[in-house]
Image: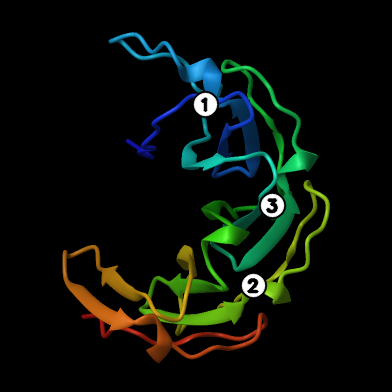
């Protein structure tokens, strides 16, 4: 299971917005998912080597932010993505370098800053307005300086100052910290230590 979306009403001007690890994005009217069979229905058409990484419930007017494991980020408005049916593949949301893949998708309305965490327990907050909206399909901008100390990006969340954050390791160790305790840094920087790893 990749995403769980709680929905009360299936209104025509609302959508499911999806992103895949290869940088494809897709927007489909929520009414297309109204009658789901017990066996399920096709939500998106994927190439063999692609995976769905995130799904959001939108009103068709949000800014979408994609973040890759090599520290690239793109922000574009979802009006730039035309609505397609359930069985379609979608369109290119972001062009990726060789070996790179999308690890996170967030919406601008989810927070004031973008929190990015890398695999060696480092992380930082960057103000949302440092990510200027552009047209979909580009390479985006640098959002994290990756080196041997940081490792690749594993996740990104839009956050607010008054929230708490839980970080969970592959071994099942969890810590809980205040978002306000995490350093706010510019786009082209590495993070600070958030959790000590064995």
Looking at the image, tell me whether mark 3 or mark 1 is earlier in sequence order.
1
Q: Which residue is drawn at 63% across and 32% down?
A: 27
Query: How far apart are the alpha carbons under marks 2 and 3?
Result: 22 Å
Q: Which of 187 and 133 is in front in this view?
A: 133
Q: Quadrant of the C terminus?
A: bottom left
Left or right: 72, with 158 as reference point: right
Label ID, residue 191: none
Q: How crowded is mark 3: few (under 14 residues within 10 Å), some or many (20 or more)?
A: many
Helix, strand or loop at mark 1: loop
Label ID, residue 128: 2
Label ID, residue 48: 1
Q: Which of 118 and 135 is in front in this view?
A: 135
Give the vertical position of 37 relative to 23 (above or below): above
Which residue is the site of mark 3? Answer: 96
Looking at the image, tell me whether mark 2 or mark 3 is earlier in sequence order.
3
State the image quarter where residue 186 is shown.
bottom right
């Amino acid at each position: 299971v990749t995403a769980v979306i709680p929905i009360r009403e299936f209104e025509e001007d609302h959508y499911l917005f999806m992103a895949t690890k290869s940088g494809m994005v897709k927007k489909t009217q929520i009414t297309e998912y109204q009658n789901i069979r017990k066996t399920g229905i096709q939500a998106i058409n994927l190439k063999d080597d692609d995976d769905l990484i995130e799904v959001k419930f939108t009103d068709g007017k949000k800014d979408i932010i994609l973040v890759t494991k090599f520290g690239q980020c793109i922000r574009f408005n979802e009006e730039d993505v035309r609505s397609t049916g359930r069985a379609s593949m979608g369109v290119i949301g972001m062009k990726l370098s060789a070996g790179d893949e999308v690890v996170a998708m967030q919406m601008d309305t989810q927070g004031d800053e973008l929190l990015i965490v890398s695999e060696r327990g480092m992380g930082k907050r960057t103000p949302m307005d440092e990510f200027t909206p552009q047209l979909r399909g580009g390479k985006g901008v640098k959002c994290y300086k990756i080196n041997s100390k940081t490792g690749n990006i594993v996740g990104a969340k839009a956050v607010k100052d008054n929230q708490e954050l839980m970080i969970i390791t592959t071994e099942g160790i969890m810590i809980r910290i205040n978002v306000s305790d995490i350093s706010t840094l510019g786009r082209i920087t590495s993070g600070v230590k958030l959790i000590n790893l064995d």
